[in-house]
């Protein structure tokens, strides 16, 4: 569907495409300190890793001190069925909702309507502009 637009609206569409292209092409100046900062950060991490994982570290220089936190905790579930059995069906039903993308892989579209409500109420996505006509040079 292509709605009929006024001249002002059509100019606005063209300006949008030009501004979007200019914004995408914008390349800020490269930060000259980024590489050295990454190198120093890695070295500070290695120094802190020499200490116990559960210890906060204060690395002191001549003029500055850098605090480094203890290592963060990574948690993984060993056995999901055993955990669900321990938590109980009521808790699982209240707190665990499957992702809709995963449900789409299992249910056929005809089946989906029985379990999932759909409505087109979300915002639209603006697509990539396509040049319909070559630009004319101003006289």
Image (cartoon, rainbow, N blue to C red):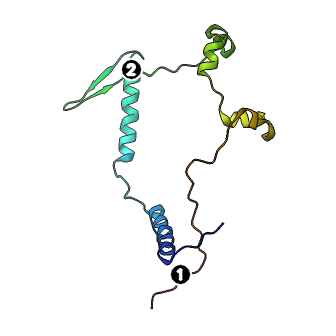
In the picture, the quarter occupied by the C terminus is bottom left
Secondary element type, mark 2: loop
Compared with 134, 109 (above or below) is above
- The image quadrant of residue 128 is bottom right
Tally of numbered tags? 2
Q: Residue furthest top?
A: 86
Left or right, residue 15 beside residue 122: left
Spot occupied by residue 72 in the image (x, y as percentages of width and height): 44, 22
Secondary element type, mark 1: loop
- Residue annotated with mark 2: 70
40 vs 66, nearest the viewer? 66
90 vs 104, nearest the viewer? 90
Q: Which residue does the image show at 51% across and 21% down from the upper left?
A: 74
Q: Which residue does the image show at 69% across and 14% down from the upper left?
A: 81
- Residue annotated with mark 1: 135
- The first of marks 2 and 1 along the sequence is 2
- Mark 2 to mark 1 CA distance (whole Å): 59 Å
Spot occupied by residue 21 in the image (x, y as percentages of width and height): 49, 66
Residue 28: image tag: none
Q: Which residue does the image show at 75% across and 37% down from the upper left?
A: 113
9 vs 38, nearest the viewer? 9
């Amino acid at each position: 569907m292509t709605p009929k637009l006024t001249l002002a609206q059509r100019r606005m569409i063209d300006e949008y495409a030009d501004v979007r292209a200019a914004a995408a092409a914008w390349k800020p100046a490269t930060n000259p300190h980024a590489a050295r900062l990454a190198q120093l950060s890695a070295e500070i991490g290695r120094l802190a890793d020499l200490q116990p994982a559960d210890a906060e570290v204060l690395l002191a220089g001549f003029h500055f001190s850098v605090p480094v936190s203890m290592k963060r905790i990574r948690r993984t579930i060993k056995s999901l069925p055993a955990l669900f059995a321990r938590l109980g069906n009521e808790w699982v039903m209240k707190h665990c909702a499957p992702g809709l993308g995963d449900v789409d892989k299992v249910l056929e579209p005809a089946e989906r309507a029985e379990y999932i409500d759909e409505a087109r109420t979300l915002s639209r996505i603006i697509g990539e502009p396509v040049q319909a006509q070559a630009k004319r040079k101003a006289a």
